[in-house]
Amino acid sequence: MAEALRRVLSPSSAAGPEEENTAEAGPPLLLLGGPGSGKTALLFAAALETAGEGRGPVLFLTRRPLQSLPRGTGAALDHLRLQKIRFQYPPSTRELLHLLCSAHEARGPAPSLLLLDGLEEYLAEDPGLQEAAYLAALLLDTADHFSHRVGPGGGCGLIVALQTQEEGDSGDALQLSVLQRYFPAQCWLQPDAPGPGQHRLRASLEPGGLGPRAEWCVAFRPDGEMTVTPWPAQAGDPSSDKGSSSGGQR
Amino acid sequence: MAGALPAVTLPSVVAELLSEMAAAVREGARIPDEHLLSLKFVFGSSAIQALDLVDRQSITLISSPSGRRVYQVLGSSGKTYTCLASCHYCSCPAFAFSVLRKSDSLLCKHLLAVYLSQVMRTCQQLSVSDKQLTDILLTEKKEEA
C-alpha cells in the first residue's frame, strides 16, 4: 500500500500505462498525524488512485461515513472509480474483528487495496498491547489473504490511518512501537506554517528500509481542494543531502 | 524504539539459518549440530522447547477452501495457541510479554516451532470450512478476554 500512497504523492513517478499491471502493492503502511491532518483525504485519494488501475475493488473500512468526498485528489471523481470503492462501517472493535476474521468467506473479486481509517478509535475500546497487536496482525493477515486471491502480479495493499496523541503524552509509545512492528513503512503528517488561506502539511514517507525517505508538501485550500508538491530541499536539512538546489551543502 | 523488530519478516541471519536447515532436510540429511547450536544461541531455551514441540508434532496448519490459513500449536501445558501464518502473532502470554512488551525475544517458542515444523516438514494438516476458520480466528480473541 505504500505504493498506492506514493502514486498519490508523486504521480510523475508513477508507472506509465503500459506498466499498469505491474502496480506493486508494497509493504503495509501506517499513516500517522494529528487531528485534521488530512489522513482521511489521503486515504481516499489512494482509494481513487487504486480504483482507477483496472484491478480489483478497494475496501475502505471506517467507523462512520465520510462527511463529504474530499476534493481535488488528483484523480477525477468519476463514477466508475467510486463504484469500485466499497465502504464498510464496523461500529465497534468487535465488529471490525469479525469482519477481518471472516473476510475469506466473502465471494466476488478480492480487493486490491484495504484501507482502515481511525485505528485509534478501535484501539481505545480495547487498549491492551496484545489486543492492538492482534488487530494489526489480522489486518496484515486479511490483506495477505486478499493478495493470494488476487494472484501474482498484483497483491492487495494495506494502508491504516492512526491519529497520534498530543505532544508529551507518552502513554501510548509502547502501543505505537508495537504497531510499527507490523507496519514497517510509515507516513507522518505534520502541520507546517500555514500559508495565506490554506492549511499546509509536511508528509514524510519512511518506506521501512525499502528506499530513501521522501517528503512532500500537502496543502488544502479552504474549499477542501488538495494539492501535493515535492517538499523543497533545504540547506541544513539532513534528509535532503541529494538536493542540488540546496546551495549550502558543501 | 529501535528495539522493536519487524513482525513481518525474520532477520536475515535467522532466515538464512532456517533455509540451510531446510536444505539439509531436503537432502535427507540430519540437521547439522552447528545449526542447532546457532538456533540455541539466537533463541536460548525457546529453541529447545520449540524443537520439543516439533518432535511431539504439536503444530497444525489449518486451512479452509478459501485458501486462508492459520497455525495452532498445542503447548506443553495442554493449552492451544493460535499463530497467524502471514506475520508474527501468537496468542500466548510469552509473546505478549517478552516479544511485544519487553522486546527481548524475537519470537515465542510457538512461533519458532511453526518455522521449524515448516523446515522439518512435520506439520499436521487440517482442513476446515470457511466458517470454522472464522470461528478459530475469532475464538483466539475471546481467550484473551
Image: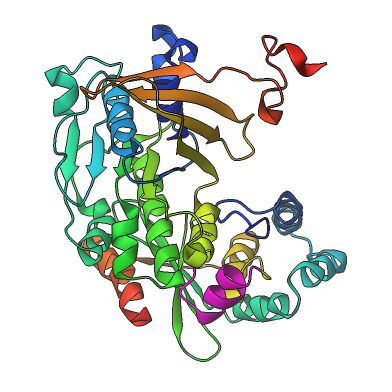
Task: Name the colour scheme.
Answer: rainbow
The answer to which image quadrant residue A33 occupies is top left
- Quick check: A185 left or right of B105? left
Camera-side residue: A199 or B9? A199
Magenta includes A44? no
- Quick check: A157 left or right of B44? left
From the top left corner, tell me how far across and down residue A177 is, in percent: 55, 58
Q: Residue furthest right?
A: B34
From the top left corner, tell me how far across and down residue A205 is, in percent: 53, 33
From the top left corner, tell me how far across and down residue B94 is, in percent: 57, 79
Q: Which residue: 71% across, 30% down?
A: A238
Relative height, residue B62 to residue A223 (above, below): below
The answer to which image quadrant residue B2 occupies is bottom right
Quadrant location of the N terminus of chain B in the rendered image: bottom right
Q: Residue furthest front?
A: A196
Relative height, residue A115 to residue A120 (above, below): above
- Quick check: A86 left or right of A182? left
Magenta includes B97? yes
Camera-side residue: A38 or B3? A38
Quadrant location of the C terminus of chain B in the rendered image: bottom left
Is residue A230 among what the camera can see? yes
Identify the main secondary structure in magenta.
helix
Magenta stretch?
B89-103
From the top left corner, tell me how far across and down residue B99 is, in percent: 60, 70
